[in-house]
Amino acid sequence: MHSVAFGSLPNGTRTVVIHRPHLHRAAVTALVGVGSRYETPKSNGLSHLLEHMLFRGTAKHSDAHALNDAIERLGGDLTATTHADYSTYELSVPPDAVGRACSIVGAMLCSPAMGQLDVEKAIVREEILENVDDDGRLLDPDTLSRRQVFGKHPLGLPITGSIDNVERFTDRDLRAHHEHYYVGANVVVAVCSPHATDRVQRMIDKGFATLREGKPRVPTVARIKQRRARIEYFPRMGSQTCVRLAFATPGEGAEMARAIEILARVLHDGMSTRLHRRICDELGLAYDVSAGLELFRDVGVFDVGACVAHESVPRLAKEVLTMLGDLALEGPTAAEVDKAVRRYSFELDALADDPHALAREYGSSALWGRPLDLDVTRKSLAGITVESVRRAARVVFTPMRLNLTLVGDLSRDERAAVRSAARSFRERFSRALCTGAWRPPARVLVRPAVARAALSAAWTP
């Protein structure tokens, strides 16, 4: 078992100390409330570029090489990721190096050198080029799908931004962004190690004491008012077309959040679940197919994706929409729900074997003002029923909220067949409405008052 202590520093930095006596490695994770969700089209990509620049040295390490050498001499490995709504810096080290690891990550956040901007811009440019064609058109199906779901809201922006934006950003832009968001009130530091809590707390205090206090940053509410299905086609030469079917969902703060997670697992969590069995094992339409769920505090997105031969796209769309309709109108089986709950529960238990996973889960929950309690989560799973999952499916898989993104080389007839599959999906629900077997959910998926409360939730230990 492990113990968890929540605390804070005088500058407002929230802390999570996870004590696991048996560990032979430790995790130091800093989470910052900033990402593409906090940007505008003009500033899009700034958070991601800043994350890269924090690897370019600190006040104590003259450049990227000196910083990386210091980390590796500890036996450590540092990774960082920019998400839509937060950024993470994760350092894995031997237990005897936790104090020095806190000092290094703290220096990155508190006093970054941010040198060699042109070099880092070139690296980010190469990253962006992986998702655009020769004409500079964005063709990443996941990013295009998010843009379709969220429209002009910042959640629809690409995390990396555009090449034009990245080339335009200056040192002044980066430092202003850093000064605004990299402040104590907007940062959580989570450490998982075998050391005593008080000792680790002192290490965090020493490493992050120089962060300015600042204020917590709250993003704008995502308002989802989609009233009709959207289908977008992006021509791209190649041997396959990539398909994404996406629906907006209630967010992490919603009562049905756990039921939506179980719904995702019923559809695809292993090779025996509905999606893989039908699409891959029985029909051979795809080598791989996936269903994913990303929950933000106020809203979420549920998507199904696969890349298939062009001529298989209409059949894929029809089969997936049929499955989604089955779950909404007929519901899952008790066996499916039981299996999904068991696998979810096992993953919660398995967190105890991964110090980085523990730090990330506890840290992100604290960042959003909802400190994680695994016992509470387990109890909420015990209350999931067939009916609660069906209710979740009826809220999520609504025909008027379907977003279908196609990136590939489809003929006019193939595109027409996809539209026909979407119409059949809608007509099935229309028939259910006429017989009283289905009722459409409220037009406004995200309640503004509830969403604002979720986004502005503050946690004071």
Image (spheres, rainbow, N blue to C red):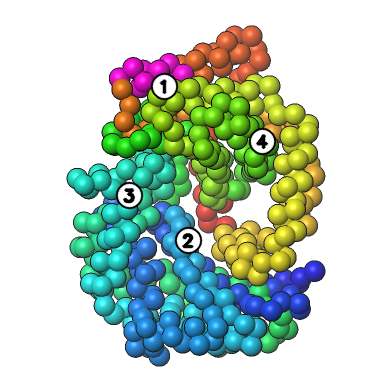
Q: Label 2: which residue?
A: 86
415 part of magenta stretch: yes
Q: Please, what secondary structure does the residue beneath circle 2 have? A: loop
Q: Where is 453 relative to 318, above or below?
A: below
Q: Amino acid at mark 4?
A: Thr
Compare marks 4 and 2 and give the one earlier in the sequence: 2
Screen quadrant of the C terminus: bottom right
Q: Main secondary structure of the magenta part?
A: helix
Camera-nearest residue between 262 and 17:
262
Identified at 77% across, 46% down, the residue is: 342
**Which percent across, then down, holds residue 95?**
65, 83
Q: CA distance from mark 4 to mark 1?
A: 24 Å
Camera-nearest residue between 219 and 433:
433
Screen quadrant of the N terminus: bottom right
Q: Is residue 172 visible?
A: no
Q: Label 3: which residue?
A: 131
Q: Are marks 1 and 2 in contact (CB under 8 Å)?
A: no
Bounds of the magenta span? 412-421
Compare marks 3 and 4 and give the one earlier in the sequence: 3
Identified at 69% across, 79% down, the residue is: 24
Mark carried by residue 273? 4
